[in-house]
């Protein structure tokens, strides 16, 4: 038994001193002092030897354990010193430091600023109007009949306030079109305005959220035609999406505007070929 303990000590000390890093050293420690380690198992076997030999063997086992623990502690200290020394050698204090990462504007804010600058370059002024609006500006002045579904509380967020005798109840603005009415009340033609703001509707599914951003422009002047509308839309598409993108307008039925159009823009991935590139 004594010979086995001495062999364990010699083997452990040799492996400890050869450990190149702290991870390997930890593995050696578990190999000998862990719950199933060689020394741990050997100490448990002491109960099986004759009674008269147990004190001497137990004392030797404690000496072996102490030697292994002290050697591990010493080697760990040496390895830590080597790591610290290498770090100090690798650091060049004359190099410039690395600054903290800088934040950036939210993507929606970036889009708002870019869209605003595009329309500003062709004479539009951006205006801001209330996100909490009177029913008359949101619906009545835009020719929405009283029984229109959009004026139902299933579609629109109504504010729990006493209705105004003239303007009706208050709502979270469902579209930016109320800004057109306010702008035409505020100034006389010519008008070239851009209203870009949050809108709110009782819609929540895979393609809708209760709050979204919308923008629209209004031009009131003499001699304005659909040609001007097409030109502005095409200018915006090329400025925002890229010079190679093309746009077209299609006649479409919208109940509250006449004439009405929808706008199509060529795909920036397939370049209008309706298939992904190889």
Image: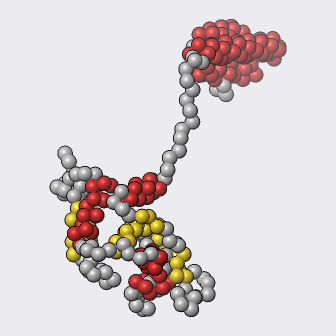
Give the left or right position of residue 61, taking residue 121 as reference: right
In the image, is residue 190 above or below residue 136? above
Q: Residue at x 61, y 84 (%)?
A: 161
| Number of residue marks | 0
Residue 232 visible somewhere in the drawing: yes
Q: Position of residue 232 (x, y in %)?
A: 28, 64
Residue 269 visible somewhere in the drawing: no
Q: Residue at x 52, y 78 (%)?
A: 133
Q: Position of residue 200 (x, y in %)?
A: 48, 73
Q: Position of residue 72 (x, y in %)?
A: 68, 15
In the image, is residue 248 above or below residue 48? below
Q: Quadrant of residue 95?
A: top right
Q: Residue at x 65, y 10 (%)?
A: 13
Front one among 190 and 24 = 190
Front one among 60 and 148 = 148
Q: Residue at x 48, y 85 (%)?
A: 136
Give the left or right position of residue 76, taking residue 132 as reference: right
Q: Position of residue 246 (x, y in %)?
A: 22, 58
In the image, is residue 252 above or below residue 162? above
Question: What is the quadrant of the N terminus in the image?
Answer: top right
């Amino acid at each position: 038994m004594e010979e086995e303990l001495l062999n364990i000590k010699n083997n452990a000390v040799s492996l400890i001193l050869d450990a190149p890093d702290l991870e390997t050293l930890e593995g050696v420690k578990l190999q000998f002092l862990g719950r199933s380690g060689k020394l741990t198992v050997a100490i448990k076997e002491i109960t099986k030897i004759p009674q008269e030999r147990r004190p001497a063997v137990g004392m030797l086992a404690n000496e072996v354990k102490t030697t292994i623990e002290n050697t591990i502690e010493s080697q760990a200290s040496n390895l830590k010193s080597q790591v610290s020394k290498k770090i100090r050698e690798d650091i060049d204090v004359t190099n410039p430091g690395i600054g903290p990462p800088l934040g950036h504007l939210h993507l929606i804010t970036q889009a708002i600023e870019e869209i605003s600058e595009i329309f500003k370059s062709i004479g539009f002024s951006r205006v801001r109007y209330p996100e909490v609006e009177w029913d008359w500006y949101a619906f009545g002045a835009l020719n929405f009949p009283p029984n229109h579904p959009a004026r139902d509380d299933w579609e629109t967020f109504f504010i729990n306030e006493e209705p105004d005798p003239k303007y009706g109840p208050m709502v979270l603005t469902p579209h930016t079109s109320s800004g057109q009415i306010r702008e035409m009340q505020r100034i006389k033609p010519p008008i070239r305005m851009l209203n870009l703001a949050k809108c709110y509707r009782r819609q929540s599914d895979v393609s809708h959220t209760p709050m979204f951003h919308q923008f629209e422009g209004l031009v009131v002047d003499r001699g304005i035609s659909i040609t001007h509308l097409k030109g502005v839309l095409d200018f915006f598409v090329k400025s925002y999406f890229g010079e190679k993108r093309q746009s077209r307008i299609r006649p479409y039925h919208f109940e509250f505007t006449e004439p009405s159009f929808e706008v199509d823009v060529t795909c920036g991935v397939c370049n209008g070929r309706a298939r992904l590139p190889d």
